[in-house]
Amino acid sequence: MPFEYDEKWNKDGEVDVLHWTQAVEKLVNDGKLELSGTELDYTVTYHDPCHLGRYNDEYEAPRDLIRATGCKLEEMPRNRSNSFCCGGGGGGLWMDFDEEPKPSEERLREALEDTDAGPNIEKFVVACPMCMTMYEDGRKTGDFEDDIEIVDIAELIVEAIGKEERADLEIVAN
């Protein structure tokens, strides 16, 4: 029995559909979510996920949030619409790659060798759970465990919020 459905959800754009980074960016810009802006002192790079970037043309909200936490953002050589896939799309998450290096290993090597900050990159920031899985795997299989940490933008935001709250508590306590 074929499934027939000819209604289009959100056909006329009655509802704004946002990625969570866009929604949180709006909260930060409207002053409803305060991030320290100077507390996190990490040198990071950011990987543009395929669906957020190339498919939905959103590149700036994640970068704006990273900067709002106080991190120094160093761009990958291949970024925005020219980003390099993590290798997890199209079922790649469940496949074993025969190619060497794996796409995730190559991307981490690129972060540590081909960005302007090179080996000073401390964190490889992602905005996609599939990318997180792929790069954590590449970090282990590519022997990058001592060189770089894989984090989601949300982790940076939580850390920035936590530092600000601690600073406020110290001021009140004194």
Image: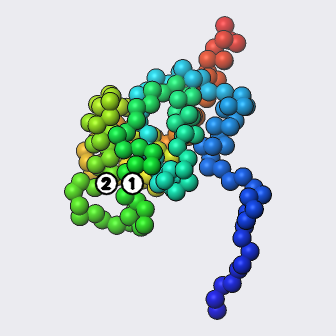
Rendered position, 35 above or below 25: above
Rendered position, 132 above or below 147: below
Q: Helix, strand or loop at disc 1?
A: loop
Are the residues flagged by discs 1 and 2 in contact, CB closer than 8 Å? yes
Residue 59 is labelled as: none
Residue type indicated by callout 2: Pro
Identify the image quadrant of residue 147: top left
Rendered position, 114 above or below 174: below
Residue at 37% from the left image edge and 31% from the top image edge: 122
Residue at 35% from the left image edge and 31% from the top image edge: 121
- Which of 43/160 is in front? 43
Q: Mark 2 = which residue?
A: 103
Q: Is residue 155 visible?
A: no
Other-residue count near label 1 (Cα within 10 Å), few / some / many at <14 / 14–19 / ≥20: some
Q: If you read the primary sequence from the N terminus, does the residue marked by circle 1 or circle 2 appear first?
A: 1
Rendered position, 142 above or below 75: below
Q: Is residue 48 visible?
A: yes
Identify the image quadrant of residue 23: top right
Q: Helix, strand or loop at disc 2?
A: helix
Q: Mark 1 = which residue?
A: 85
100 left or right of 3 in image: left
What's the CA distance linking mark 1 and mark 2?
7 Å
- Which of 4/153 is in front? 4
Residue 172 image point, x, y percent:
70, 12
- Which of 132/118 is in front? 118
